[in-house]
Amino acid sequence: MKILIVGAGGREHTIAWKLLKNDKIKKIYIAPGNAGSEMLENAENVTLENDINAYVRFAKENEIDLTFVGSEELLVKGIVDEFKKNRLKIFGPNKKAAILEGSKAYSKNFMKKYGIKTAIYEIFNKAENAIKFLKEYKEFPVVIKASGLAAGKGVIIAQNLKEAVKAVEDIMVNDKFGEAGSQVVIEEFLNGVEASILSFTDSKVIVPLLSAKDHKKIGENETGLNTGGMGVISPNPYVTNTVFNEFKENIMEPTLKGIQAEGMDFEGVIFFGIMITEKGVYLLEYNMRLGDPETQAVLPLLENDLLELIESSFDKKLSEVNVRWKELHSCCVVGVAEGYPENYKKGDIITGLDNFDENNNELLFIAGAKYENNQFLTNGGRVLNTVGIGTTPNEAREKAYNLLNKINFNGKYFRKDIGEIK
Ligand code: AMP
Ligand code: GLY
């Protein structure tokens, strides 16, 4: 069997690593991939134009049996529909379902329509109306969101009226996020702890994966700028049985009803970003793909074969799979280039990458690094992920940090408090 994975991050390296545990899979192409393919037997990077037709052509010419898309842009643009039109197998949401991530205005209305617990909100198409609404708003902070895709940067938590008005102007007048800001969602601020619950669906059932806790800010204690994610632990200690049951009842089950009622019918991933508050569990957003770096922490704990889950989804038999988890904890720490998430340098030599032992529950997933002239070189902001697996959260943390400490590159930075529960 031959598989194509589309993407360049640590998430895609992890998906390839997990899939290759199945010896039915003879070859994985990753487009464009990263230096991670150098660590995997039977994986190869391919350079393709970032265009749906180019992926379709490659899949046809190379007789690809299954395509898995890592990130959201191509899903929202309809890569799944195009593959299916060409009778190519692809795991992911069609355009009609991907809009749950592609438009926050659409997804909030979907949540309301299907009684899914979420923050109270209003949608605006014109800056002046949004500002008029804000002038009468009493309870700051308030949350302002560009509706479209903004690479995780389109959410602003405004502490007062002045900041809120500036956010609306930046998004709607100054077009800070381009087209993504033609609509804004203004919503109630929720105070609580976040959790990521990834899941697989065949549109008949939703099968949640183990919970995870992302660490989004660049600085320790959640300070400084937002990033793509600086580290993850799994399971998330705040997702107790009570929280999970509330999530299932008030979020997951009504989401499935909505997907069915809207005729979205697809096989793929739903990633629920939830907020656990004193008033209960709320849905912040849907992502229609696996999380990065959540995937790096969650997939290593999955006992099942990943291909089995995907194939059962295509057969609409996901409900028959007994999903099993290792009774262990994982911790993923992200090593980033100095300056990230703002400007950073590329091309620094990375050393110490062969210092890990999978049998000792240490894993290494490459993100922004390339392999050139027999050297590993930094090639992005989030350079690599080290993952530790342990019988306790602390053992997992120690393994992840020990491994990251053995790896070096100029300006290496990482948060020291991933998984620290205060
Ligand atoms: P989203 O893309 O909607 O998940 O928002 C990105 C981040 O903004 C979330 O992970 C939260 O940290 C924060 N956020 C979003 N909505 C809210 C809200 N209603 N209250 C508090 N924080 C929020
Ligand atoms: N780690 C958050 C995301 O993948 O969107």
Image: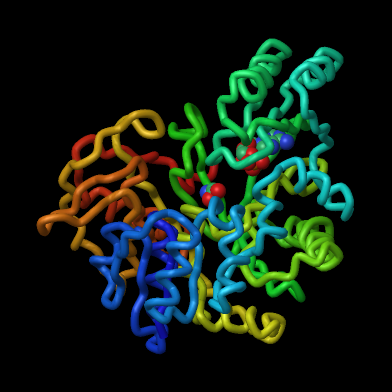
In the rendered image, residue 339, in percent from the top left (x then y), is placed at 33, 30
In the rendered image, residue 258, in percent from the top left (x then y), is placed at 83, 61
When asked about the image quadrant of residue 278, the answer is top right
- As rendered, which of 254 and 331 lies closer to the eye? 254
- Describe residue 77's horizontal placement relative to residue 44 as left or right: right
* Residue name at image x 67 percent, y 23 percent: 172
In the orientation shown, which residue stands out farthest toward the bottom? Answer: 24
In the orientation shown, which residue stands out farthest toward the top? Answer: 162
Q: Ligand 1, what quadrant?
A: top right
In the rendered image, residue 69, in percent from the top left (x then y), is placed at 50, 63
- As rendered, which of 35 and 125 lies closer to the eye? 125
Give the total of numbered labels.
0
* Residue name at image x 32 percent, y 43 percent: 380
Does the rendering let one see residue 237?
A: no
- Describe residue 342's horizontal placement relative to residue 130 as left or right: left
- As rendered, which of 397 and 126 lies closer to the eye? 126
- Describe residue 172's horizontal placement relative to residue 346 as left or right: right
* Residue name at image x 77 percent, y 23 percent: 126
Quarter holding the N terminus is bottom left
When asked about the image quadrant of residue 400, the answer is bottom left
In the rendered image, residue 27, in percent from the top left (x then y), is placed at 34, 79
Does the rendering let one see residue 83?
A: yes
Quarter holding the C terminus is top right
- As rendered, which of 380 and 189 lies closer to the eye? 380
When the figure is inspected, residue 383 is found, relative to residue 3, above or below; the finding is: above
When the figure is inspected, residue 258 is found, relative to residue 404, above or below; the finding is: below
When asked about the image quadrant of residue 62, the answer is bottom left
Coloration mode: rainbow
